[in-house]
Each structure stands twice: as C-alpha cells, then as structure tokens.
Amino acid sequence: MELDGLSLTLIALGVLAVLVLFAGAKVVPQGYNFTVERFGRYIRTLKPGLNLIIPFVDSIGRKMNMMEQVVDVPHQEVITRDNATVTVNGVNFYQILDAAAAAYEVAQLELAVQNLTMTNIRTVMGSMDLDQLLSNRDEINHRLLKVVDAAVQPWGLKITRIEIKDIDPPKDLVDSMGRQMKAEREKRALILEAEGKRQAAILQAEGQKQSQVLEAEGRREAAFRDAEARERSAEAEAKATEVVSNAIASGSVQAINYFVANNYIKALEGLARSPNQKVLMLPVEASSVIGAIGGIAEIAKEAFSGDKPANRPQSGRPPSTT
C-alpha cells in the first residue's frame, strides 16, 4: 500500500512528537540533583524522579551527587607552636546541600575542599604545642570542623566530619618521648614504693600504739584488782584483829596464844625473806606453836559459831564437868 503525502506527514509528526517527548522528559536518580540551563544560564534544579524540560531549549547542566562524600587529606608537615615538625593526614566528609551553588560557585569542588582542609589543619595545629597536639585530637577535629564548615557554606556544602588519622612526630622526637615516658613511669613507681613504705610504717606505729594502750589498760585493771584484793584482805585482817582483841579483852588464853603465834610466824617470814639469810636455825618450841595454832582454830570456831567469850573457859584447858 502506497502512502500518500498526508499520511507521511502525520507519521513524521508522530515521530517528532515522540522525540520531543523523550527530549523533554528527564529522570533524576535518587541521591542526585540536575541543574537545568537555558542558553547556558542556570534556571532551576531537577529533583529525583521524572521531570520535564523544554526540549531543545533547556538542557541539563551539572549532575550533582547529593550523598555524603569523603575526601582524603594527604600527608603534610605541620610546625607546632613549640617548633616541632610533625606529619599529619586525615579525611573530610561533606555533603552538597545546594546543587546550584556547588555547581556554579566553585570550580573543582573536591580539590577545593581538600586544599581548604589542608590549610586549616596547618593553621589549627600550628597554634598548639606538641603535647596538646598528641593528647587533644578531639579538640583538633572540633576546631577544624567549625572553621572549614563556615568556609564552605557559600559553596552550598555541609562539612559533617573531619578526622585526623595520623600524627607522626620525627623519629628522634619519638625516641625522646619514649625516654621521657620511661622516666616518668620510673618516677611514679618510686613514689608509689615510698608511699607504700610510709603507709606500712604508719600502720606499724599504730599497731604498737594500740598494743601499748591495751597493755597499760591491762596493768591498770590488774592494779585495780590488786588494790581491791588488798582492801578485802585488810578488812578481813581488821575483822580478825577485832575478834582477837575481843577475845584477849575477855581473857582468852588461846587468843593470846594466837596473837603471839601470829607475830611469831610473821617474824619468821621476815627472816626467811631476808636476802642475807641462806640458812636459818631457830630454837622453836613445837608445843607453843601447836598451841597457838590450836588457839587460832578455837577463835575461828567461836567467830563463825557466834559464841560469846564469856562462855569460854579462862585457860587453854577444857572446862571441868564436875
């Protein structure tokens, strides 16, 4: 079948319409933004999904990755405030918030972020001493993040993190730091040892003090009890003396014998305790001593039985029953 001119025209228009439709439809993947330019000028930004532009008039300018990206910061030398040279590297994480600004406000975006981070690393770390540099890495990261994030805002970027990976001092400085650390640890060990000896001496003195206090308290308690015992003994002796005195006053011969025998025995005890007397020879009459002891027994019997001296016989002989 031969097509006439009208049919050919309609087919051509249909094909053209399809081409125009395909030329005007733009699909933006998730995580990306496309800029649209009209005759070389930015006019708008396409978001993820299906978008339409004017075919043959508008065109896609820049395809910007809106996901968080990472830039390696290469090794570089940094001179600290105390003139120590260290080698530092790190990483920078950033995200594009404004696709148009990131596309048209800066050229070579990644290189610009990298160089900006490197210069600020030298500025921030160069204002610190070496000891601060090695012990305050979190503070360095925080200060870098604050400075670099403020610098990239005109580019439509957000710096999410900056991490310093390695800080390498020179080898001679590392050796010096090692010796310093060793000396510091030895110093701490000596201090701890001295402190231990001091604590041991204190505890030992405390123990001796408590021991002496307890010993003194024991002596005091023993002296108190000895005094109490002597008091009881004196009371008993006084009572016995009273009984003997009453018996003597009533004319008891046994009481007199007891009194004489008691003094006799005390005199013998004093002689026996004398340090100069090694051998003691006494002309002792056994019957007198036995009689005195018998008198003691009779007096004790009377004292505990409650009999009055008037009922006793006046001599050491038993009373007559006739």
Image (cartoon, helix red, strand yellow):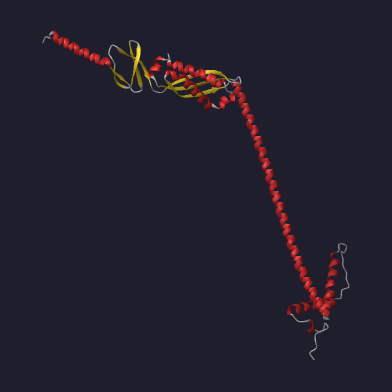
Badge count: 0
Q: Nearer the viewer, residue 221 or 150?
A: 150
Where does the N terminus fall, quadrant-wise?
A: top left
Dividing the picture into quadrants, the one containing residue 220 is bottom right
Asked if one can make out residue 5 in the rendered structure from this viewpoint, the answer is: yes
Q: Would you place residue 190 above or below residue 230 in this image?
A: above
The structure residue drawn at horizontal position 66% and vertical position 39%, both measured from the top left corner, is 195
The structure residue drawn at horizontal position 61% and vertical position 25%, both measured from the top left corner, is 177
Q: Position of residue 26 (x, y in %)?
A: 29, 18
30 displayed left or right of 208: left
Q: Nearer the viewer, residue 311 or 81?
A: 81
Q: Would you place residue 115 above or below residue 268 in this image?
A: above
123 displayed left or right of 252: left
274 displayed left or right of 29: right
Residue sticking out furthest to the front: 43
Q: Position of residue 99 (x, y in %)?
A: 38, 19
The structure residue drawn at horizontal position 67% and vertical position 38%, both measured from the top left corner, is 194
Asked if one can make out residue 291 in the rendered structure from this viewpoint, the answer is: no
Residue sticking out furthest to the left: 1
Residue sticking out furthest to the top: 5
Q: Where is residue 230 in the image (x, y as percent from the top left)?
A: 77, 66
Where does the C terminus fall, quadrant-wise?
A: bottom right
